[in-house]
């Protein structure tokens, strides 16, 4: 009898164990049993021999129709070779199997009339689809043929994600051997929880998912095993939240009659009711003796910055400092500019024109000049800067603060769990409050999972007076006239005093991308090998300035420019001195120029859905209606085009984030630890399992409250430890 943590070798033998280890990274009995079938073949599917495409790795069930041995003419003098050609059928289609070795043996097995399962890669030979030396297993014949057929029809055949060296059938055989010898195994899910949610026992679920007798057994088995994944993950998050709650932080209560009050009086607009309410929640959390860990969600343009700034001012009033981290240098610079402007005399601390209570706002970026940097570091360390704004590069560096009270992370969508951990580690000693802002709204399940260790608040409405943005797809290759129309439209807009963004996926010239440009989140499967390289900022800017946009003020902005240059260009665009800004995704997040009304995205199909939504958020920020043109060479009815159509069809960020999540691998969303082959999330999908994840979260919170160390649930404690180890390993892998 064997248990889950035992190695596979004693049960399966050296060869099979080694193969499972090298091919699939499976080492223990538990590893193998958590390697689930991807799907199940049923008889219904077996009639589809005709649909098999070349290059596909397939498993089919079919009956042998004929078997023919042929002698192959080799070179004179070489050993005579023969070939066995077997034709199999499922009643509709046919497939040829070709064997070059052990011909006699195979001929004995593959007698006409027998039925078997065949696995291999479909190739084309003289226009016939064939499987060359497939792995196979014959189904027993004889007995009552009717019964056979019925059992055959009913019993689902598990199909495992296979490799060339390790077929689905071989994996099923190994799993079967292991299941046959498996001892009683402890169930990590507490019995009461199982009863409450009608969950199968672990042993039974494993048996049913690997060796179902009927299709109806698979669903409940999967459901139970999904619970394992969701529950342990939620335990980890609940534990983390609880730990954070126990830490000490300096309370930063609101001080009347100081900076924040002065700022509120000067505010040129009234806060939306959402901003006011979220503001109250955050203000209260900042008064706590434990660190706030708050996630602020809000669609593009919902006005998160002012919410964050008000929180920072509360902390400054209470004697602390606040740091605002932005994902790009352009955004850090812009925040610095706009926050300084919004504060006016309130940001002129220590100067003659400074207001009472005034503080200072320092900017720290990775590539600024030595002198500016020294000054900013000094202001941070001495405490004379109440607010320090910088890029995430700050995390890696030894920036000292006099009294760090609040860390605000802007546009979090580029950052995963690991980065947040780094942030928290930086925070040791001071234990500041943390406010994370997402640029893109995220589905609730992602919030519960990826950000499950944060408390969530959301801004659900946009400030009043926003104009809608109309979005159109411009098929540049099919309808070149549409594109020339687009440039005419740009000229018209500029004539009316408006400004325009043109976005390209690449910088240009030597092709290297700067860190600021970020990864383009397009699934690789869409890439055709023959595609031309993506359009580049430098080239497009030059072409536009000489061609369709001649005579307008056109400039290029990208991450390879020096920081001062970037800042100067952005400044000129913001001041209206430039008409057209040709840029990479450096302008993706946060950039705020209300007079810009048109955005033309070149090669729009090279961007991910969320990215396009973010980009589009740069226009329609003032009272003027916006126009967004998605220029693409893709043809209709391709996934890439469908993605663009989805973006054109709605401006609802929540809707688009679902589209995005469906198109991307979930691993991208989850970050390293929860993705990958040895992932803790195998069955669970964030979009479809919302209800289950919600229940698991409630159960996890309750259990952690009553038994924080899981002393009465040793199995769970072990599972949790394994998950955390895996996470830590993934984090170390990355750094
Ligand atoms: P995001 O949530 O995308 O970061 P911002 O904070 O950049 O949005 O805000 C977008 C624009 O809306 C800014 O120009 C900001 O000054 C403005 N804004 C914020 N709140 C309000 C409000 N209550 N009324 C009017 N305009 C507002
Ligand atoms: Mg913003």
Image (tube, rainbow, N blue to C red):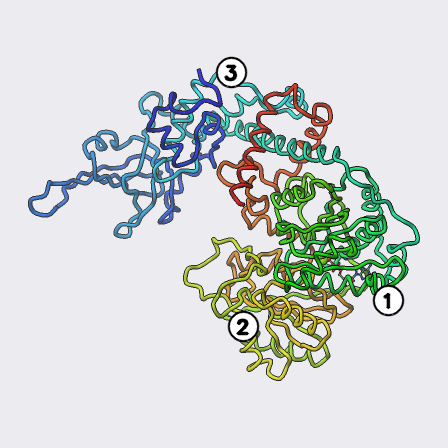
Q: Residues within 10 Å of mark 1 (few under 14, many from 20)?
A: few
Q: Is label 1 in a helix, a strand or a loop? A: loop
The residue under label 3 is 184
Residue 370 sits in quarter: bottom right
Measured as percent of width and height from the top left, residue 326 is found at 67, 56
The residue shown at (67%, 48%) is: 442
CA gap between label 2 and label 1 equals 44 Å
Vertically, is 318 above or below 546? above
* Image quadrant where one finds the N terminus: top left
Residue that numbered label 2 is attached to: 538
Of residues 567 and 612, which is closer to you in this image? 567
Q: Quadrant of residue 28?
A: top left
User: Taking the image as drawn, is residue 313 in sight?
Assistant: yes
Q: Is residue 461 visible?
A: no
Res 713 quadrant in image:
top right
Query: Is residue 450 found left or right of 133 in the rendered image?
Result: right
Q: Name the residue beneath numbered marker 1.
A: 352
Residue drawn at point x = 47 percent, y = 37 percent: 38
Image-based side of 434 in relation to 36, left or right: right
Marks 2 and 3 sit apart, C-alpha to C-alpha, by 66 Å
- Residue 486's place in the image compared with 614, above or below, is below
User: Taking the image as four quarters, which one is ligand 2 found in?
Assistant: bottom right
Within 10 angstroms of label 3, few (less than 14), some, or many (20 or more) residues? few
CB-based contact (under 8 Å), mark 2 and mark 3 = no
Residue drawn at (65%, 72%), measured in percent from left and top? 569
Please tell me which of labels 3 and 1 falls first in the chain. Answer: 3
* Residues at marks 2 and 1 touching, judged by CB atoms closer than 8 Å: no
**Numbered tag placed on residue 421 in the rendering:** none
The residue at the far left in this view is 77
- The spot of residue 341 in percent (x, y) is 79, 65
């Amino acid at each position: 009898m064997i248990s889950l943590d035992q190695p596979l070798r004693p049960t399966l033998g050296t060869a099979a164990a080694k193969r499972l280890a090298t091919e699939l990274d499976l080492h223990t009995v538990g590893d193998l049993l958590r390697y689930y079938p991807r799907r199940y073949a049923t008889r219904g599917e077996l009639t589809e021999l005709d649909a098999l495409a070349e290059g596909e790795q397939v498993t089919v069930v079919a009956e042998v129709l004929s078997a023919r041995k042929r002698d192959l003419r080799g070179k004179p003098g070489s050993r005579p070779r023969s070939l066995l050609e077997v034709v199999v059928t499922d009643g509709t289609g046919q497939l040829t199997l070709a064997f070059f070795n052990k011909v006699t043996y195979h001929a004995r097995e593959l007698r006409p009339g027998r039925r078997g399962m065949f696995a291999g890669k479909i190739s084309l030979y003289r226009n016939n689809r064939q499987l060359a030396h497939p792995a196979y297993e014959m189904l027993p014949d004889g007995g009552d043929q009717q019964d056979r057929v019925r059992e055959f029809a009913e019993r689902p055949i598990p199909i495992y994600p296979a490799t060339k060296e390790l077929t689905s059938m071989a994996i099923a055989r190994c799993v079967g051997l292991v299941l046959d010898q498996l001892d009683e195994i402890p169930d990590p899910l507490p019995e009461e929880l199982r009863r409450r949610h009608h969950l199968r026992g672990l042993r039974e679920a494993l048996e049913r998912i690997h060796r179902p007798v009927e299709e109806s057994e698979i669903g409940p088995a999967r459901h139970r095993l999904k619970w394992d994944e969701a529950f342990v993950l939620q335990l980890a998050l609940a534990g983390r939240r609880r730990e954070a709650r126990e830490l000490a932080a300096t309370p930063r209560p609101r001080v009347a009659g100081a900076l924040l009050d002065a700022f509120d009086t000067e505010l040129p607009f009234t806060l939306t009711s959402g901003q006011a309410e979220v503001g109250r929640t955050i203000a209260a959390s900042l008064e706590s003796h434990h660190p706030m860990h708050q996630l602020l969600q809000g669609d593009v343009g919902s006005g998160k910055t002012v919410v964050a700034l008000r929180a920072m001012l509360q902390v400054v009033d209470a004697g602390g400092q606040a740091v605002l981290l932005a994902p790009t240098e352009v955004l850090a610079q812009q925040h610095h500019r706009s926050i300084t402007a919004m504060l006016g005399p309130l940001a002129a601390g220590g100067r003659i024109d400074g207001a009472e209570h005034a503080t200072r706002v320092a900017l720290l970026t990775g590539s600024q000049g030595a002198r500016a940097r020294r000054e900013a570091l000094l202001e941070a360390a001495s405490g004379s800067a109440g607010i320090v704004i910088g890029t995430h590069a700050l995390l890696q560096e030894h920036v000292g603060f006099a009294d760090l009270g609040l860390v605000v992370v802007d546009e979090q969508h580029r950052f995963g769990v690991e980065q947040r951990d780094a942030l928290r580690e930086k925070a040791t000693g001071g234990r500041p409050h943390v406010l994370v802002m997402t640029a893109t709204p995220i589905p609730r399940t992602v919030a519960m999972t990826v950000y499950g260790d944060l408390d969530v608040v959301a801004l659900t409405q946009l400030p009043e007076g926003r104009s809608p943005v109309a979005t159109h797809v411009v098929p540049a290759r099919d309808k070149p006239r549409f594109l020339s129309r687009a440039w005419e439209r740009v000229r018209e807009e500029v004539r009316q005093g408006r400004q325009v963004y043109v976005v390209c996926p690449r910088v240009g010239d030597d092709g290297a991308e700067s860190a600021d440009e970020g990864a383009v989140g397009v699934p690789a499967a869409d890439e055709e090998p023959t595609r031309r390289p993506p359009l580049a900022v430098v080239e497009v800017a030059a072409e536009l300035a000489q061609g369709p946009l001649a005579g307008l003020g056109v400039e290029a902005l990208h991450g390879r420019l020096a920081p001062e240059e970037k800042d100067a260009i952005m400044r000129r665009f913001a001041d209206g001195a430039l008409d057209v800004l040709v840029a990479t995704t450096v302008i993706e997040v946060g950039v705020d120029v209300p007079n810009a009304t048109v955005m033309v995205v070149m090669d729009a199909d090279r961007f991910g859905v969320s990215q396009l939504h973010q980009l589009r958020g740069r226009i329609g920020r003032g009272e003027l209606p916006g126009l967004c043109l998605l220029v693409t060479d893709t043809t209709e009815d391709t996934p890439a085009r469908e993605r663009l159509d989805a973006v054109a069809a709605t401006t609802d960020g929540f809707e688009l984030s679902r589209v995005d999540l469906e198109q991307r691998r979930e691993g991208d969303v989850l970050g390293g630890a929860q993705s990958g082959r040895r992932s803790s999330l195998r069955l669970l999908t964030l979009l479809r399992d919302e209800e289950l994840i919600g229940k698991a979260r409630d159960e996890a919170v309750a259990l952690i409250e009553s038994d924080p160390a899981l002393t009465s649930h040793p199995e769970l404690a072990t599972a949790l430890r394994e998950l955390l180890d895996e996470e830590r390993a993934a984090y170390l892998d990355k750094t």
